[in-house]
Amino acid sequence: MRNSARTMNLAQPLPFSFEPATLPPEAERLRADVRAFLATELQSLAPELKARSWGGFDPAFSKKLGARGLIGLTWPKKYGGHERSALERYVVIEELLAAGAPVAAHWVADRQSGPLLLKFGTEEQRQRCLPGIAKGELYFAIGMSEPDSGSDLASVRTRATKTNEGWRVRGTKLWSSGAHRSQYMIALFRTGDSVDQRQLGLSQFLVDLSLPGIHIRPIDDLTGHRHFNEVVFDDALLPEDALIGNEGQGWSQVTAELAYERSGPERFLSSMMLLKHLIGAAGSNPSQRVAVALGRLAAHLQILRGLSISVATQLERGANPALEAAIVKDLGAVFEQEIPQLAHDLFGEEPSLDADDAMLRVQAYLTQISPAFSLRGGTREILRGIIARGLGLR
């Protein structure tokens, strides 16, 4: 019986590129300023709160970042931005996550909603939203996943129907992080005639979450926190100008957006606070077993960082490294999830949120939340399907 599985043609160039890249001197100068600012701002923040980092919601802190010009870093000045490079922004994100800063309030808006509006939005949409994002005062949620759809965005069923009044929307979005605290959502709706069109007939919309007919229902996670949400559109009416870009182009737009979501330092630094505590617990004279385990983690971290910086460099050039971003996200989630388990294997103590030891409190939080690392931003299965298609294996 012939094996019908596809194989790679190794004589052909690989369909992705991770060219080595380095951070410019101006980025490293900015790093020193950001690090000094964070050392003062976060000195009283408990370790288990630092472990939340880009899940930690603190509007006052986001406003301070905005006042220092650290949000909307790459955007044009006319929209409240600062016209600095993507690699300078990369350094800011690294320092925020490594320090455990609570950045959830502005995170989605700065990382992907703002860039999406810059690329595809109307001038009115940009003027309405971008300055507030840059100030750290306007928050966005993501409206992609749906019940029974998960990361299979082509199966979106929530429908936006064009009427004389605007767009009537019916359906449900799920796992929308921070929607209960956000003013806006960028949502992917079906506008074509047939659900069977899959990738065709999808459009993106700028949704004011205060509009009638939009109901936001927070979902408690395993840690007892309300972070995820179900967002129900019950015949909600969006204005005609809520459409982002061109009708029916939502799929190509959202894949460009996902490159921002999947490739940054947040895809491998979510467990950084625990890694720091592990290194501290190992001391200056660790056993060979501990030294080998931590050395392996350090090597993986360096590799992931190099891959991620390469993607950031491509984004700086205006490329759309969707395949490369999927690879970084998949490998990064494996790394992040490995650290809590390794902490238990190396030291054998049971983590607890009530423990006196800060490392055990951090470990307890990350043990509970780490299963989500391979769900958010695209499940492991979806990402590996994207990678397989990129390699010509399916």
Image (tube, rainbow, N blue to C red):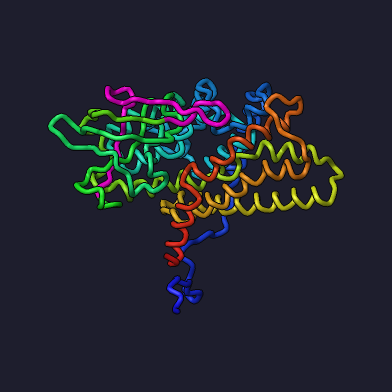
Residue sitting farthest toward the front: 1
* Placement of 279 over or under 251, stated as above or below: above
Q: Position of residue 187 (x, y in %)?
A: 33, 37
Q: Which residues are magenta?
A: 201-229
- 258 left or right, relative to 199: right
Residue sitting farthest toward the left: 164
Report if residue 392 lies within the magenta region.
Answer: no
Q: Position of residue 104 (x, y in %)?
A: 51, 30
Inspect this view and state whether residue 110 appears. yes
- 352 left or right, relative to 106: right
- 285 left or right, relative to 88: right
Q: Position of residue 156 (x, y in %)?
A: 32, 44
Q: Residue at x 47, y 44 (%)?
A: 377
- Choose between 75 and 25: the one closer to the eye: 75
Inspect this view and state whether residue 76 appears. no
Q: For the C terminus, which image quadrant?
A: bottom left
Q: For the N terminus, which image quadrant?
A: bottom left
- Choose between 47 and 64: the one closer to the eye: 47
* Placement of 349 over or under 248, stated as above or below: above
Q: Residue at x 65, y 46 (%)?
A: 338
Q: Residue at x 54, y 26 (%)?
A: 225
Q: Position of residue 194 (x, y in %)?
A: 21, 48
